[in-house]
Amino acid sequence: MQPFQRLAATACPLPYANIDTDQLIPARFMKRSRAEGYGGYLLHDMRFSGDNVEISDFPLNRPRHRNAQILVARRNFGAGSSREAAVYALVDYGIRCVIAPSFGDIFASNSVNNGLLPARVDERDAETLIRLLEANDTMLIVDLMEQMISAGGLSVPFNIDPVWRMKLLNGWDDIDLTINQADAITRFRADDLSRRPWAVPRTAC
Amino acid sequence: MAQNPSGPRTLFDKLWDSHAIVTREDGQTLLWVDRHFVHEGSFHAFNKLRERGAKVAHPHLTFGIADHYVPTRRTGHGIDTAIQNMLDQLERNTSENGVMLFGLNDPRQGIVHVVGPEQGLTLPGLLIVCGDSHTSTHGAFGAWGFGIGASEVAHVLMTQTLWQRKPKRMRITVDGTLALGVGAKDIALSIIARIGADGAQGHAVEYAGSAIRALSMEGRLTLCNLSIEAGARCGMVAPDETTIAYLRNRPFAPARDDFERAAEDWLRLRTDENAKFDREIVLDASEIAPVVTWGVSPEDALPITTAVPDPESIPDSGRATQIRDALTYMDLKPGQKLTDIRIDRVFIGSCTNSRIEDLRAAAKVLSGRKAKVPGLVSPGSSLVKQQAEAEGLDQIFKEAGLEWVESGCSMCVGMNGDIVQPGERCASTTNRNFKGRQGPGARTHLMSPAMVAAAAVSGHLADVRPLIEERS
Ligand code: SF4
């Protein structure tokens, strides 16, 4: 996984709360293979009208925000389903960081597993950033080492779980960490079978 | 909040402790996973296994279920090739890995969160995961169920474990007695309306109180199912005699003496007196009315006796904008009475409300009445369907003018092609009223099965209570 340390890039404001995973990628696209890339489906029904015409005043469709790698949204971003496809759509579009006051838990965890930074900011700071990006600036610097977002003279701190921060900084994959624990898993398993014999499905014994 | 290891523990602490394999210095804990369900959408995870040349580590602890894409009309209709491909992929991925599959033609097929409990695969004290956010449903048994993404599904397939950080603990206590016509769905929507769709984020929720104890397993499943709509990591109810009675003689549950021994362990799974929660919420059951949603988030829920909110009277400008946007999408007017909202169709189904008790509640209202709008009734599993037919419920639905179809996720998510048409308004027993959830441009109002039945016979959102009273 690509490590995330510091990113200076175009940022796009999405001044909406509760952008759920059904909006991030509508269910009807999820039959497709990832190999084709999911970027085209990102926020599809917000970006395109019923007859597939771009909605010109949707923020991501504005020329100055089109190449965004950072999104700034309102509370509860990524609520809803566990579909990792929502993260694939963001990543395949080119987004590397989403800034919001709160995130759906499963979405946030999926993000980290794909090198996408979910940066949690104060609700007021999110509003400040949205206003700034609406007005003129389009660039933000997101520094994961310092846990700081900056633009021009403005600096805004953000929160992230320390474990997730380490994973992102190093581009770590959980599987590698788990394989080192093989002995502990075997020991746990043996004890557990005597502690909780009922935990094994009957017809599979 | 750190708990003293020898001090009083919550139910969640006990579940956590019994699954912790190792805890790293940074606080991340490796957990043992007892049950893993996979469905058609799990293909990303199986592809990850393939890339690594890995196999499923404990195939007998993983169960495959076809539900998200299954057609609900199985005769006389050709299956769309893309959908058939999803079903074939699941079949291939499970059989190549020695994983048991409840496939399309299995008589036990159904929605994963209905089939797990029904088969006794869901048991108290288990850690259960699935690549589906409504895995919180299984918490009804005092299990710890939560949804995971494809990377985590791949991790569980390869190792039967998962890294997690410990969530905070929240207790939601509902005391008192529910009024006639009010049920678990109304409790859940009332909670979400009160704390918000992100109100329980980062928390493991335990439901307690006399109104929760009085719920059947079906009701508890509905309640725990909707925990994720409050943003919770999981929701659970401590096992009691209701739980034990439900599980006795389930196919995959322990049998005979093993069951009795297990039941003793299960009944010990409860929060110790004086155990501390990070947050406590208390509701009075007698104050809960039948609830419907009017907007595009489950938090947009109100008692049926009230009106659509007016953004002009909301001081918080962010919230006012959100309401305005929701009203535009839903094509509603500020201040409009909820009972004046006309509907185009109804849907009874999904892992939230498609169990036998849900179908009975809807049938009771529909019996001898005609629906004024078309609608679909999709039982939660093939076994629920069989039972409903044995009780004659299918006849009631059909005579009311609704379509009685096979089980699957169906119009909850529209993946199988059962969708609400653009601009149409649907009274639905499902769990998400997100924009486009039931199809592009679809407008969804969430409510209980009895309330959907009331809406069906009225042609608009309606209070089910007078309709029930007329009968008794
Ligand atoms: S019925 Fe709906 S919520 Fe439940 S598992 Fe299926 S798609 Fe998910």
Image (cartoon, helix red, strand yellow):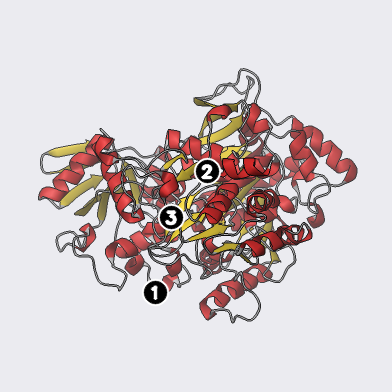
Numbered label tally: 3
Per the rendering, the mark at residue B342 is 3
Left or right relative to A62: residue B64: right
Q: Which amino acid does label 2 sit on?
A: Asp
Q: How far apart are marks 2 and 1 (CA)?
A: 48 Å
Residue B324 in the image: state x and y as whole percent.
28, 47
Per the rendering, the mark at residue B463 is 2
Left or right relative to B84: residue B300: left
* Between A122 and A6, the one nearer to me in the picture: A122
* Between B382 and B93, the one nearer to me in the picture: B382
Q: Which residue is drawn at 69% across and 48% down?
A: B357
* Disc 2 chain ID: B
Assign a secondary structure to mark 3: loop
* Disc 1 chain ID: A
Left or right relative to B367: residue B193: left
User: Is the C terminus of chain B in the top left, top right, bottom left or bottom right quadrant?
Assistant: top right
Q: Are marks 1 and 3 in contact (CB under 8 Å)?
A: no
